[in-house]
Image (spheres, rainbow, N blue to C red):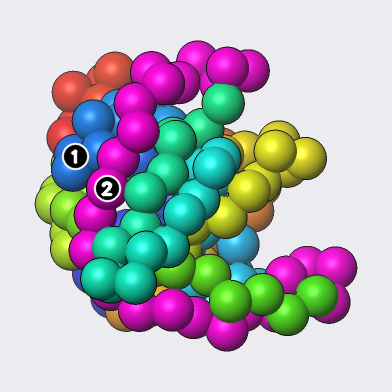
Amino acid sequence: MSDKKIIGRKELISIEDLQLYDLDAKIDTGADSNALHCDDIIIDENGFVTFTLLDEVHTSYHGKRITLPIYKIKKIKSSNGIVQHRPSIQVMVTFFGKSYKTVISLTNRADMKYPMLIGRRFLSNKFLVDVSKEYLAKSQTNEGKI
């Protein structure tokens, strides 16, 4: 039997390093990597990226400007087929009661319903997705299973 946790198509994730807690995330097995909605993304020549987390329509918005070292500039083809060069950062996240170090690309997802996208690289060898379910971590926490 697999020791992988079953997750739903939508889950909650906390990004500890950014002080974002219980952020709605879409699980996207078609996406290779994770992505987070940010505004005013500025890359400087010293290898840092400055950005504003989310925007005022999201409940987790706190208006902070954050500057972090760039982990990598990634060439990413978005769902509409446009290739973008996105900065990515390495952060600690909490997902299903465990902490993980992961890489997240920063992009403007203002026209998307969910501010966070969780991709295959993060899910690989740890989770199985049941697309008929949602927010399984939340229901397990409420039942005292985590």
Query: Magenta residues?
Result: 56-81
Q: Could you say which is closer to the camera, residue 116 or residue 54?
A: 54
What residue is drawn where x is 18% and y is 53%?
Answer: 92
What residue is drawn where x is 38% and y is 18%?
Answer: 62
Where residue 123 appears, as percent x and y from the top left, is 39, 69
SS label for mark 2:
strand
Report if residue 126 is visible in the image: no
What's under tag 1, amino acid-wise? Glu
Q: Could you say which is closer to the camera, residue 84 or residue 123?
A: 84
In the image, residue 117 above or below residue 24: below
| Quarter occupied by the C terminus | top left
Is residue 60 shown left or right of residue 14?
right
CB of mark 2 within 8 Å of CB of mark 1?
A: no
Membership of 58 in magenta stretch:
yes
What's under tag 2, amino acid-wise? Thr
Where residue 72 appears, as percent x and y from the top left, is 35, 79
Membership of 143 in magenta stretch:
no
Inter-mark Cα distance, 2 to 1: 15 Å
Q: Which mark is residue 54?
A: none
Q: Residue furthest right?
A: 80
* Discs 2/1, front: 2
Is residue 131 shown left or right of residue 95?
right
Whichever of labels 2 and 1 marks the residue nearer the N terminus, that label is 1
Q: Which mark is residue 16?
A: 1
Where residue 37 appears, as percent x and y from the top left, is 55, 44
Q: Which mark is residue 67?
A: 2
| Quarter occupied by the N terminus | bottom left
